[in-house]
């Protein structure tokens, strides 16, 4: 029997609630195990849900200094049971860097995982390939120097987040904080020196090449995945004929929520917007809605659990995605998987995603009039909405289901491993 290809996934955060990287890690590992790979996972906190399909899941602990700094839990940054633990070299680095406004997790995790895997290799363990999930810390170059091919997944470069942060900043102090927070120099340096960079759209591939300087031939677009069994239509859930749904944060300028509020003011008076966003009274969406005269036509739900989010997708007549930039556009894909048509702006990867799935229409960026027209157009034609919803569901399953993404990822692994074999043969 042929030996299984042994993969080592490394992720500095693993929980599904901490961002898309946790979702990506869990589902991709599950599907690769189903394809016959042996999967080990080395992961930092917050940790993933149980992964019974993995051969090993090893937690690499840290003191979570940055999370405590972010939530202003300054007292919690010093371990109460063993205060001297804060003085160990890596813990002290994370403590000091967090207090100074840096994001220390990617570098610190990469060094911990390098130390851990190097020790296991000294004991005789071997992996065929290492797959990093959005860390890109210097420790990965150490692992590659030990002879293991390394690939990484980058949904979009941190330069995109930094530009959005600059837009939010209101003074020089905030702008300086933005400049020092993002570890872009480290990530771009590492990305240029590993075997492949996987990403989720041609738009992101171009952005990685431009901002990180990664040669385009080293980047592979494998798309992003979705659990199409979970995100699915349900005929027992009635569609609200007046409900437009949007999933996005008003605090992120890239999500285009202000433009959507202005568009709602120009739509038919019966149209109502449900926004999945923070419902704190200081959320600017309430100010924008009052200024536009539509405060009584908007519901802001606050954060909702996944099943409630799916119920919103299923009950909406359409989903609006007014983004100014997207590296993939997950809400659009989730909506189409639930059989709900989408009106999306032609922003970043959204154009590609909508072309692949065919479950809606696109309009220009930052054009509230065009967005309002698109919403009215679909809200006024239920037969067209149904047809688009059916098309979107079918094509999302064809293109974006996790088994499809895993097979595309496995093709990249095979390419990298074949390339490494040729290198070894040339040296021999």
Image: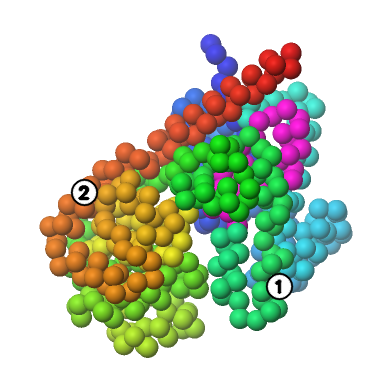
Which region shows up in magenta?
132-158
Q: How many marks?
A: 2
Q: Label 1: how many residues lie within 10 Å, few (<14), some (14-19) or many (20+)?
A: few
Residue 390 is marked as: 2
Which labelled disc corresponds to residue 332? none
Q: Is residue 312 visible to us here?
A: no
Helix, strand or loop under label 1: helix
Q: Quadrant of the C terminus?
A: top right
| Residue 279 locus on image (x, y percent) | 44, 77
Task: Say which residue appears at 36% left-offset and 83% top-offset.
Answer: 289
In-image side of 309 versus 55 (left or right): left
Q: Is residue 174 left or right of residue 122?
A: left
Q: How is the image coloured?
A: rainbow
- Dot 2: what SS? helix
Judged from this view, the residue extending furthest toward the top is 1
Q: Is residue 38 above or below residue 347?
A: above
Mark 2 Cα within 10 Å, few/some/many (few <14, many 20+)?
A: many
> As rendered, which of 111 and 321 lies closer to the eye?
321
Q: Position of residue 119 (x, y in %)?
A: 79, 33
Q: Is residue 141 magenta?
A: yes
For this rendering, which residue is in front, 368 or 319? 368
Q: Residue at x 60, y 76 (%)?
A: 169
Give the quarter of the image for residue 400. Answer: top left
**Taking 383 as reference, is 130 left or right?**
right
Residue 123 drawn above or below residue 358:
above
Residue beneath disc 1: 176
């Amino acid at each position: 029997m042929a030996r299984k290809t042994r993969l080592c996934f490394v992720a500095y955060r693993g929980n599904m609630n901490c961002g898309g990287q946790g979702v990506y890690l869990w589902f991709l590992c599950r599907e690769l195990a189903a394809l016959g790979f042996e999967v080990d996972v080395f992961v930092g906190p917050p940790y993933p849900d149980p992964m019974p399909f993995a051969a090993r899941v090893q937690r690499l602990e840290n003191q979570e200094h940055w999370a405590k700094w972010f939530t202003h839990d300054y007292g919690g940054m010093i371990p109460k049971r063993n205060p001297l633990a804060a003085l160990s070299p890596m813990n002290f680095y994370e403590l000091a860097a967090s207090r100074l406004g840096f994001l220390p997790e990617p570098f610190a995790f990469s060094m911990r995982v390098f130390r851990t895997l190097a020790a296991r290799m000294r004991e005789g363990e071997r992996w065929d390939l290492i797959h990093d999930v959005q860390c890109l810390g210097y420790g990965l170059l150490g692992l590659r120097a030990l002879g293991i091919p390394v690939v990484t997944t980058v949904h979009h470069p941190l330069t995109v987040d930094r530009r959005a942060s600059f837009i939010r900043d209101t003074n020089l102090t905030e702008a300086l904080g933005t400049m020092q927070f993002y570890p872009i120099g480290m990530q771009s340096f590492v990305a240029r020196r590993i075997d492949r960079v996987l990403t989720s759209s041609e738009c992101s591939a171009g952005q990685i090449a431009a901002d990180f300087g990664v040669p385009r031939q080293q980047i592979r677009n494998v798309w992003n995945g979705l659990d199409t069994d979970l995100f699915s239509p349900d005929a027992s859930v009635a569609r609200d004929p007046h409900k437009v749904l949007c999933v996005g944060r008003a605090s992120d300028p890239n999500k285009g929520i202000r433009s959507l509020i202005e568009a709602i003011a120009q739509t038919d008076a019966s149209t109502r917007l449900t926004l999945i966003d923070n419902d704190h009274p200081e959320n600017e969406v309430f100010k924008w809605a009052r200024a536009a005269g539509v405060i009584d036509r908007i519901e802001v739900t606050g954060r909702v659990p996944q099943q409630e989010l799916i119920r919103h997708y299923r009950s909406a007549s359409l989903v609006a995605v007014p983004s100014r930039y997207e590296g993939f556009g997950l809400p659009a894909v989730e909506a189409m998987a639930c059989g709900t048509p989408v009106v999306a702006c032609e922003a970043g990867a959204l154009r590609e995603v909508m072309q692949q799935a065919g479950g809606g229409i696109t309009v220009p960026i930052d054009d509230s009039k065009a967005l309002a027209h698109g919403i009215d157009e679909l809200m006024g034609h239920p037969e067209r909405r149904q047809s688009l919803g059916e098309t979107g569901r079918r094509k999302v399953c064809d293109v974006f289901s996790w088994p499809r993404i895993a097979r595309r990822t496995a093709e990249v692994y095979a390419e990298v491993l074949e390339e490494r074999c040729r290198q070894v043969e040339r040296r021999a």
